[in-house]
Each structure stands twice: as C-alpha cells, then as structure tokens.
Image (cartoon, grey):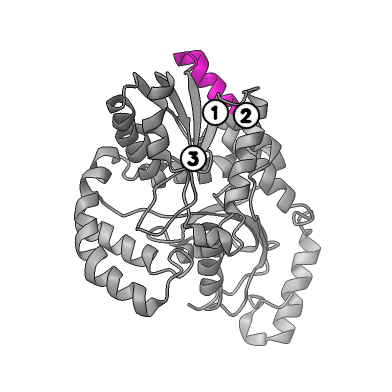
Amino acid sequence: MTDQVLEHRTDPATGVLLINLGTPDAPTPAAIRRYLAQFLSDHRVVELTPLLWLPLLYGFILPFRPGRLVHAYEKIWTEEGSPLLAISKRLASGLERRLGETLGRDVPVALGMTYGTPSIATALAELEARRVRRIAVLPLYPQYSCSTNAAALDALFAELNTRRWVPELRTVNSYHDEPAYIAALAQSVRAHWQARGRGDYLLLSFHGLPQRTVLAGDPYYCQCQKTGRLLAGALELREGEFSVAFQSRFGKLPWVQPYAEPTIAALPARGIRQLDVLCPGFAADCLETLEEIQLRYAETFTAAGGTALRYIPALNDSPAHLDVLGGIVLRQLQGWLPAAADAADLAARQQRAAALRPGFSGNSPAG
C-alpha cells in the first residue's frame, strides 16, 4: 500500500486503534470456515509445530467444525449481525464521542479485528485518511495473553511493515487490575442483583488457555485470578460465595483449571439453586458468552438440579465501560495533544516543503 502524502494544512492528528479478536461475517459454513482458517492458523493461538497442526486443521477441523458451529452462531446472530462486531463498533464510536467531549478536540477512533473484518489494515487506512500520525493501540483484552494481545500486535506490526512512514505507537499491555475496570464490573454485578435478586453463588468465568501456554510464561492465568480477587473484594464476597473458572476448552490437551462446565454441573449438589455468572475477560458479548454460557451451560446447570443460571452481560458499550477505556486512553495520549499550530507556522511549513521538493507544491511530508 502506498502511503498518503500529507498536506501541510493541519498538524498530524492523534488517534486510537481498538483491536478485538474478530468474528465470521455470517452464520454460514463458508464464512465460519474462512474465519477459523485465519484464526487457527495463527501460531500465537495454536502453538504446535505447523507440520503437525496444519494437516489436522485442514484435513479434519475445517471440513467439519464450521458446519457444527452454524447453529450456535444462528442462535446469537442479530439484525446488526455478529454481537461482537456490533458492540465493538458502538464502543469505538462511543469512545470517540467521549474523548471529543473530554478533550474538546477530535480524536479519531478506529476498530480493527485481528481476524476477519474490519481488518487492522482497514482501521489503519481509516486513521490515515484522518491524518493520524500518533496512535494509541488498545487491544480489548483486560488480561494479557500471547494468544490475544500479542497476536493483535503481531497483526498490527505486520501491516505496518508494508508502510514507508510508520506512525508513532503506544500500546496498552493489559488492564486486569485497573481500579475503574474493577469498579465497573462490580457495578454491573450490583445492578444485576438489584434487578433480579442476588443468586446463591457468583462464578467468574474466563476464556481458557492450554496449560502449556501458562507454563511457558504467559501471565494470563495469574491476571485472571487477580481480577477475580479484586472483584470479590469490591463486592465484599466471602470464600465459598464465588470462584474463578475457565471455559471454551478446545482439543484434548490439558487446559488451565478448573473447567467451567463441570464446575457449574457440580454446584447444585452443594445446594446452589440460583447461579450468577460473569465473564470479566470479555469486553463485548460474543459466541462464548451468549451461546456457551447463557444457553448451553445454563442447560447443564438445570440438568444437574439447579433452578436458573443468570448470565450477567459483559460491560459492552455501557457508559461505565466507556469511562474505563477513556481513562486508559487519556493516559496514553499525554504529551501527544499539543496546541494546534497557528496559520503563520503552517504557511511557513508549506513554503519550506515547496523549496525542498518543488514538484509537490507544499504537499510533501517535509515539515
């Protein structure tokens, strides 16, 4: 891709790139297959030797798994399409409004997906069209993992590798113990209790990871535990009133434990009839929260003797979540928002550019 030639009419802008995982474009076998092929081919996601993994992926998983997932996606699909995409778009537009109101100036916010659409390339092009040269990068994963945060940054840097003029970047590693994030989660639980009554138990379910990933040094498991501990403290929960578990296991290798589904199945035997479940690691509701937890695991719970599993929605595009993300971004933007140059300074830039590269008539990148 050819870089745009920036005109010397305004200062280069500062912007924000939100990155989420991605989603199929439609609840169809073909769309799901395209998405899974990209997702499961990433060495950050599946850390197996390609010589062993790729024949399994293309010979057994991709021919059959997309068809089995169609019904699951159909259950959660909305008029806006994928919930993950629709919510992430609202997060981006809401954050841009929030930053504009707070700072009194335009701060472009673009959304890119590590896999699928809109791609990170599309998001960068959107920011470039708005003259952004400084980008605060915020992957929407509170707890850091190489399979999410690092994969997102890999995709970003791979795209930047095609550009001659790379923008300045500041990246957010994680926000698992951000006080505002913990407070927003606690607020969402209290709102649920106020509206529906307090359940007998609160399960905090995070997406799982292969155990070998954590043993190799990934901080994800420990950060999930810390989020759970801080949230329990904010809610003044005692031991025996909550626990942390891990969902979405895939394959036969051991993953971090305890596993969410058997944990849920065992709770009714302990006298727990009303179960509340929150998924703090998901910034936006998606297949894993809406179909796996809210529908499938709810059936597991009632089949084991429970009365009801009540899923507490992700923070999504709530005002509290926008406050959390806005606060994180504002810290990243410190020192990046100088006063706009005056007209005389801009005119001088144009004259210098014209003198240095006459053919560009003041439109060269020279400043």
Residue 114 covered by magenta stretch:
no
Q: Residue at x 45, y 54 (%)?
A: 255
Give the residue type that dot 1 points to. Phe
Query: Which amino acid is tagged 2?
Result: Ala
**Chain part drawn in magenta:** 186-198
Q: Quadrant of the C terminus?
A: bottom right
User: Mark 1 falls on what kind of element?
Assistant: strand
For the residue carrying disc 1, how many other residues have a C-alpha within 10 Å: few (<14), some (14-19), or many (20+)?
some
Q: Are marks 1 and 3 in contact (CB under 8 Å)?
A: no
* Numbered circles on residues, count: 3
The picture places residue 348, in percent across and down from the top left corner, at 78, 71
Residue denoted by label 1: 242
Q: Position of residue 58 (x, y in %)?
A: 26, 71
Crowding around mark 2 (Cα neighbors within 10 Å: few <14, some 14 to 19, many 20+) is many
Quadrant location of residue 87?
top left
Tell whether 142 sits left or right of 275: right
Q: Nearer the viewer, mark 2 or mark 3?
A: 3
Q: Quadrant of residue 128?
A: bottom right
State the residue position of label 2.
Answer: 232
Q: Nearer the viewer, residue 317 or 178?
A: 178
Please indicate whether residue 21 sits to the left or right of residue 302 in the image. Answer: right
- 285 and 59: which one is in front? 59
Which residue is painted at 27% across and 45% down in the image?
73
- In three-dimensional space, the C-alpha distance between marks 2 and 3, rounded to whole angstroms, equals 14 Å
Looking at the image, which is closer to me, 19 or 104?
A: 19
